[in-house]
Image (cartoon, rainbow, N blue to C red):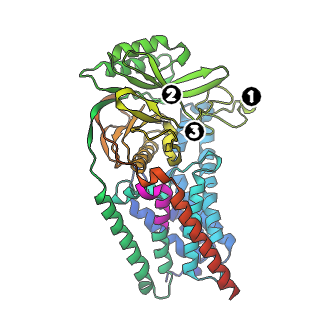
Amino acid sequence: MIPVRDWPLALRLLAAATLGGAGAFGLAPYGYWALTVLSLILIVPIFLASETRARAGWIGWIFATSYFVHALSWLIEPFQVDAERHAWMAPFALVFMAGGLALFWAAGFRLSRHPGASQTLQGMWLVVTLSLLEMARGYILTGFPWAGVSQVWVNTPVVQLLSLVGPYGLNALTFAAAFSIGTAICHDRPLRGLVVPMSVTVALVCLALVYAAMRPPVQDGPHTIRVVQPNAPQHQKWDPAYAPLFFARQTEYTAVSPRPDLIVWPETAVPAWLGSAQPFLAAIAEAAQGTPVIFGIQRGDGPQIYNSMVYLDETGQQAGLYDKHHLAPFGEYIPFGDLLGRFGIRGLAATTGNGFSAGPGPELLDVGTLGRALPLICYEAVFSQDLRVGSGRADFLLQITNDAWFGTWSGPYQHLVQARMRAIEQGLPMIRSANTGVSAMIDPLGRVTASLPLDEAGYVDAILPQPQKPTYYSRSGDSLALMALSVLALLLVLYTHRTQRD
């Protein structure tokens, strides 16, 4: 048994912070998933050594704050685009965001600590409460599920379980394996206590491996897609001296032969408002030579502005329009924006006080012979729940994004990981065009079949894989994970009440 109870509180908090920071090494661009699992295992003895619920809450908050500070360190990058105005906000934004997200973990640790209850029971409580609160993190206040622990599995066969249980179900399975082992090592005879949790964990891993091996093979489709990556740094993207150069770069890549079946440009790729962009649209149609093109652009509709995706058909005419509906708070809009705008406080990507307006919601985009696409603009690919559309099933996912905001270290790679997860969950291929990278073709098993490196201009022609049959998760969403966790929570409440009464 680890003698954590003999440690002073300051040492426990330091250990929790160290473990939290180390746990983030499981995320991209590192990918050391074992460190995440190990940190989750080792935080359990510190949690169980907490004499009170309040101290347990502090342990959870310190652990998670350290984890999120490391995982979300890319958040400082948007504030460097206009450093003179915004750089001072960067450390506050990172610390407040990390500390705010960590409140979910603090609540989970606090609610799970039951002095006098068995260690096994408290470990089970920790699995259930944290799993439910991590699910809540993806929904409350528009949600922010970035850096969920399920993301560490993306380069392993375990990630294929997303097609069954989704990201929150995989979170719960990860917590169950790690926390049961962490509880076992706190027993007086840890080797004996490890037999059951290790056996169950090994069995789950074996089942995951078998399930991954049984996934149907991916078939190539008949269509070739050209993904364009102009590599426009954010501080130059809208500069009148540079914007024409980036637009010319995109048209140059578009005009290259042989011709693909579809050309995709990234988010806000056209340096004009849609209502006044006719010269740009004509230049795109001329370069495309009869090939349909999809691109990102801003548009206005009276006092409202939108972050939009436009589809130009073979004739160069606008044949489809999608407005981003899941906006990034404090990035694309800010609450009470008109009032705060008087004091110079605006969303980083906004051009007016309230910023962008939200579109009507997820919808399918008809792209001719290629079928129907489910459009996603930037941040929307982070939300698994946003991929459920009532009007039928897409033939492929289509993400356009401007990851220049995220810098060149962890942010763009973590965003790519989440895009790969969405493809697995839906059993659909994804076309991904990113301004500075990473642009990619992703197959229905989440594998990158073609890509352009980060911070490099160019284009890539790639075969669009065929979609697979609808996955269980694509049909049920988070209902399975929510129902299982709710039932387990009810059983724990009843059992805890009975043991306390006895």
Task: Give x and y (percent) for residue 308.
Answer: 52, 27
Residues under numbered marks 2 and 1 in contact, where contact means CB atoms less than 8 Å apart: no
Residue under the image location 44 percent in, 25 percent down: 295
- Magenta segment boundaries in residue numbering: 163-175
Q: Residue at x 47, y 29 (%)?
A: 267
In the rendered image, which residue does mark 1 sit on? 342
Dominant SS type (magenta): helix
Give the crowd class for mark 2: few <14, some 14-19, many >=20 residues within 10 Å: some
Give the image quarter of residue 349: top right
Q: What residue do we see at 57% from left, 39% from top? A: 326
Residue type (three-letter) at the residue carrying disc 3: His
Label 1 amino acid? Arg
Residue 295 appears in the picture as rendered: yes
Residue 174 on the magenta segment: yes
For marks 2 and 3 on the same chain, the one whose residue lies earlier in the sequence = 2
Query: Where, by quadrant of the figure, is residue 191 drawn?
Result: bottom left
Q: CA distance from mark 1 to mark 3?
A: 25 Å
Residue 373 left/right relative to 326: left
Q: Which mark is residue 235?
A: 2
The residue at which mark 3 appears reads as 326
Disc number placed over residue 12 in the picture, else none: none
